[in-house]
Image: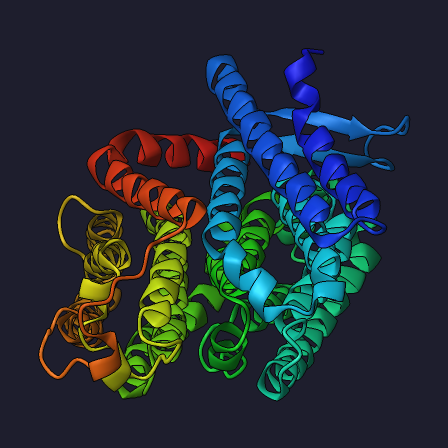
Amino acid sequence: MSFVQNFPCFSIVLCMVAGILSTPMKGKNAKRMTMAVVTLVALMSAATLFYVMSAGSSYIYTMGKYPAPWGNELRVGVLEAMLALVFALVMLFSLAGGMDHVFKDVNEEKINLYFILVDLLLSSLLAIIYTNDLFTGYVFVEINTIAACGMIMIRESGRSILAATRYMVMSLIGSGLFLISLAMLYDITGHLLMQPAHEAMVRLTQAGEYEVPLLVIISFSTVGLAIKSGLYPFHSWMPDAYGYSTISSSSILSSLVSKSYIILLIKIFYRVIGFDTVVTSKIVNVLFVFGLIGMIMGSVSAIMAKDIYKMIAYSSVAQIGYIYMGIGLGTEAGMTAAIFHILTHAVTKSLLFLSAKGLNDASGRKRVYPALQGAAYRNPLAGAAFLVGSLSMVGIPMLAGFISKLLFATAALGASPMKVLSTLIVLAVSTVLNAVYFLHTVIRIYTPVDVPEEFKGTRIRTGAGAAAALFCLIIMNFLMGLLSQPITDLIHLGIEMFA
């Protein structure tokens, strides 16, 4: 075994150990450890990606001495390594970009707790990406949920505690449905490792046995993870959870946490149930319809939002709809578009939240639109970053969002006539709505008239960490837009390895 093959396991364990070691530390020391660990995880993820690309195949990493089908495994392929790399980078930039607000918004005695939660969250994200065992996936889904909930409420304002409560209630409903599906799956297959469970599912499907329980398993696992990821109409927790957390938490939650549940669902579709069986069950049609509704309703809610954070949060509802619409097309092209949009949204949404923080700081920490007028002149870097993120979400060429929408439109052409028509119409309408609320905000921050008197002639100096984070996220957005073909090729290869 090559030493690099140990890196996924090392990454997961390292984050958990860092969380434990941070417990007695003061806030600044916990911060240094967390930033070092996240950087190291990104480097190990990059090395893992290069290794599996050169090998041209995935590999199984056995945890402990017990082999399949009794033991626990990690499965590492091109898609998993690429997702781990992007997630680690986005988390690194989200922390760097919002670090000053962490120390302002969080009680000094609880700053080390914040970084403990970040360590646990990254560990759970990596475990969900790499795991080849369903129950391990469930365990880390719960760790993910608890850590995310803690990151919301640690600000200790009334609104953040209420938002965390709403998030927990919806997450518990989703977790319950998902756990029931796993219990039923284990009951009829006798396996929790993905490959043996898939082989048993194939035998049952071919024999025509347990048709109703299999449909219930597919439905419960899909609905459970859809609730946790915030698919419309299960999105009610999103605006407050994203809007009233610390800015780093908002960036991480919107960019990474919701997407991890979708990634686990995709793994279950391909590696446990079989995507052909999922398509035959018609559950993809349900995801398709609710994805389309989410694309419209999320955008309408964003237009009606009164402050910039709520607008970005409601935009996430629409973007989650895009991802589920792609999955709902029921084709490999649709799945490729959905996975590419997961990456696009991770990079762009963190850019938007971090730049909104800079604009907010330039407006006396007021986030309502009238106070933001002219904010881009008071904080030029934040204004430019928000402009890039907005144009990407609208779908302007050369940026990642344009490639996402192009992939969705192209994928729709390979689906049924009804799906082709509805996808193209809703995609066009949603794009127009995206332009309405994003460009409205861009125009507002670049309008120099009626600037409040106390802000005239003032400029906010962006900190080195925040500036570096914004620059890196802007560069990633352009790279995904200009070099999209290698990324989509890797996604294709990863899906083939899944299947």
- Image quadrant for the N terminus? top right
Q: Which residue is drawn at 39% across and 59% down?
A: 354
Q: Residue 333: give x, y in percent of width and height.
A: 32, 46
From the top left corner, tell me how far across and down residue 269 is, in percent.
55, 52
Look at 52% across and 14% down and name the residue there.
55
Question: Residue 65 is drawn in which quadrant?
Answer: top right
Instruction: Tally the marks.
Output: 0
Q: Which of 333 and 254 is in front in this view?
A: 254
Q: Is residue 172 visible?
A: yes
Q: In this view, does 13 lie to the left or right of 211?
A: right
Q: Where is residue 106 in the image (x, y as percent from the top left)?
A: 64, 68
Q: Residue furthest toward the right?
A: 65
Residue 145: quadrant of the picture: bottom right
Scheme of colours in the image: rainbow
- Seen from the viewer's position, the closer of residues 167 and 206 is 167
Image check: 469 left or right of 87?
Answer: left
Q: Is residue 332 visible?
A: no
Asked if residue 417 is positioned above or below residue 190 in the image, the reply reads below
Q: Left or right of 472: which side holds 482?
A: left
Whether 232 is drawn above or below 329: the answer is below
- Residue 189: x and y in percent read 78, 51
Q: Nearer the viewer, residue 124 or 273?
A: 124
What residue is shown at x 78% (from left), y 63% (from top)?
A: 184
Q: In this view, does 174 lie above or below 136?
A: below
Q: Residue furthest top?
A: 2
